[in-house]
Amino acid sequence: MGEDAERLQISDLAGELKRRRDTKALGLRAAAKEAGISFNTFARVEKGHVPDIETFIRLANWVGRSAADFLGEGSVTADSTPDAVEAHLRGDPALSDEAASRIAGIVREFYTQLAKPPEVATAFHLRAASTFNPKASELFADLLQQMHDALSPED
């Protein structure tokens, strides 16, 4: 955002939504669909309710602004890396909404396939019943080891 650009408040989003809807001659349902959010959420935000961060970013982009226009640089954090990439793409004036969505979809797909999932450690203790014979416990231990090896990512 440039130094001479108008600083907006989150509360200004409602007016921006109404102006954008009027400019495009859209009803609430059509505007909500175009913005990619539910009708009820769109209506609430246009009445002045503060949306969650993901909805806020979508609506800011839909009115042709970046979230930083409302909050200042560095104040918005997305839930994940693909969300942050999408927010930046939607704020790029050189990209249409469709182009930004397509690129964001590709990034999200690649990220999902290539990102290393967080390691989840599950600890548990198995107590053998008194009728559990030693051979059964050995077989069970082997089975658990095979399952662990099959489910653990290779280093």
Image: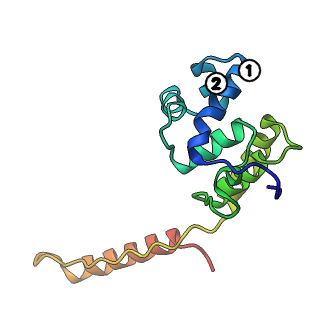
Tag 1–tag 2 contact (CB < 8 Å)? yes
Instruction: Tell which of 152 and 100 is nearer to you.
Output: 100
* Residue type at tag 2: Ala
The answer to whether residue 109 is visible is: no
Residue at 63% over, 46% down: 57
Q: Sort mark 2 into few (<14), some (14-19) or many (20+) by Cα contacts within 10 Å.
A: many
Q: Who comes first in sequence, dot 1 or dot 2?
A: 1
Residue at 65% over, 50% down: 70
Q: Give the side of residue 59 with respect to residue 93, left or right.
A: left
| Residue at numbered disc 2 | 31
Residue 48 position in % (x across, y down):
50, 36
Instruction: Tell which of 128 and 78 is nearer to you.
Output: 78
Residue at 68% over, 59% down: 72
**Circle nearer the viewer, 1 or 2:** 1
Residue 97 is labelled as none
The answer to whether residue 35 is visible is: yes
* Placement of the N terminus among the 4 image quadrants: bottom right
Q: Secondary structure at mark 2?
A: helix
Instruction: Tell which of 38 and 130 is nearer to you.
Output: 38
Residue 146 position in % (x across, y down):
45, 73
* Picture layout, residue 76 above or below residue 92: below
* Placement of the C terminus among the 4 image quadrants: bottom right
Q: Sort mark 1 into few (<14), some (14-19) or many (20+) by Cα contacts within 10 Å.
A: few
Which residue of the protein is positioned furthest toward the left in this rendering? 130
* Residue type at tag 1: Lys
Instruction: Tell which of 68 and 105 is nearer to you.
Output: 68
Residue at 75% over, 53% down: 88
| Residue at numbered disc 1 | 24
* Picture layout, residue 41 above or below residue 146: above
* Picture layout, residue 48 above or below residue 105: above
Quarter-of-image position of residue 63? top right
